[in-house]
Image (cartoon, grey):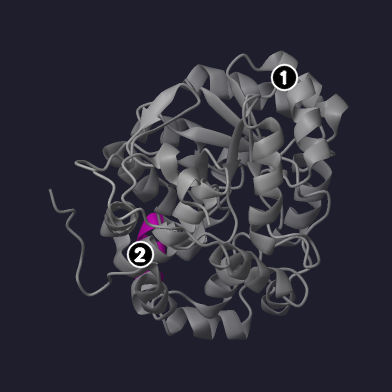
Amino acid sequence: MTIKINSKYPGVSDLRAKAKTRVPKFAFDYLEGGSNEEYGLAKNTNAIREVELRSNLLSSVSEISLETEIMGHTYAAPFGIAPIGLQGLMWPNAPEILAKAALAANIPYVLSTVSSSSLERIAEVSQGQAWYQLYNPTKDDIRVDLIKRLKAAGYKNLMITVDVPTFGYRHNDIKNGLSMPPQMTISNIIQMLQRPRWLLNTALAGKPEMVTLKPYMDKNMPTSELANFMNNTVMGKVDADSLKVIRDMWDGNLIIKGVISEADVASSIALGADGVVVSNHGARQLDVGEAPVRPLQRISELYGDKISVMMDSGLRSSPDIACAMASGAQFTFLGRAFVYGVAALGDQGGDHTINILKRQLTQLMGQLRCAKVSDLPQHLV
């Protein structure tokens, strides 16, 4: 059966171009940005596109299956929606739009700690199928309460981000005075007025806030104090000892996100994690690091039979997904691609982006003569 797509936007690049015309510059800069000189952004995508796959054209393949099992669940495709903070800043109600689309398509949606929707609301709209991404709180009572809320809401998969020991140094965010909600500088006000549809939808939805974290904030906290709150309360240190505390508290699946070295994967296995996401935070934290697809190949060879190995960062299309899977990933996550979709097409953006990726991947696997996603490593050049 042919997967239907909007023919005006057949690729993620088309969605990106449309999104750029509908979102204020400061919000688009936040979504697009990398750290320092942004060399890591190009490095991530270039490394993936250096991977080559080989067709076996005389093989007999009657049916293509995208089904992939991870964390005890069989998903309809080998990709999910990565956690992205401030999604509601890019497009109002983006977390709910994407969580609903993920449920309908049977792929995972991962809610960010710093999302503009609460963990309880996303558990409701995803019918308990969403995953949750956690920054390790500095305060024990907040950590305990968040995990208690996650259990009560029915979350099964907890993804701990470990690659933010410092705030990323992002030039455009500094210039734009980006915060949540955004600072009302003259420049930002002008940018918002230039995007009337975004402005109207934002006004109707209400100003974006970090809803899950609101119970832990002072009621009258000024915007200028938000960075200090994040640094002093939300983003505590993450090492083997602090992760063990969370492992002991959490009886569901525990995934460590942001590891990029064999040593960190070994440590994750030792503490009892169920999965790792090989990632460099979309090149938003470190410019000089290794592109994830390269250590992925080494990590999967060493540890792929001991822990579930997933990947994000730099993936923009199904050819990228296929190359990551061929390089040893058992599952992949995309972030920016889905926000482009929602910003471009609103309520239909999540469904459309998923359909693009599924249709691309089905065609690609048919061309390779690869029947199952798990067979993609056999096509690696």
In the image, what residue type sits under mark 1? Gly
Residue closest to the far front: 58
Q: Residue at x 71, y 74 (%)?
A: 38
Q: Earlier in the sequence, mark 1 or mark 2?
A: 2
Q: What is the crowding at mark 1: few (fewer than 14 residues within 10 Å), some, or many (at least 20)? A: some
Dominant SS type (magenta): helix
Q: Quarter of the image holding residue 350?
A: bottom left
Label 2 neighbour load within 10 Å: few <14, some 14-19, many 20+: some
Residue hosting label 1: 272
Q: Residue at x 65, y 47 (%)?
A: 297
Q: Classify mark 2: helix, strand or loop.
A: helix
Above or below: residue 309 compared with residue 155: below
Tell me if 161 is positioned left or right of 5 in this view.
Answer: right
Residue at (58, 40) in percent of width and height: 310
Magenta residues span 199-205
Task: Say what amino acid the circle numbered 2 marks.
Answer: Asn
The residue singled out by tag 2 in the image is 201
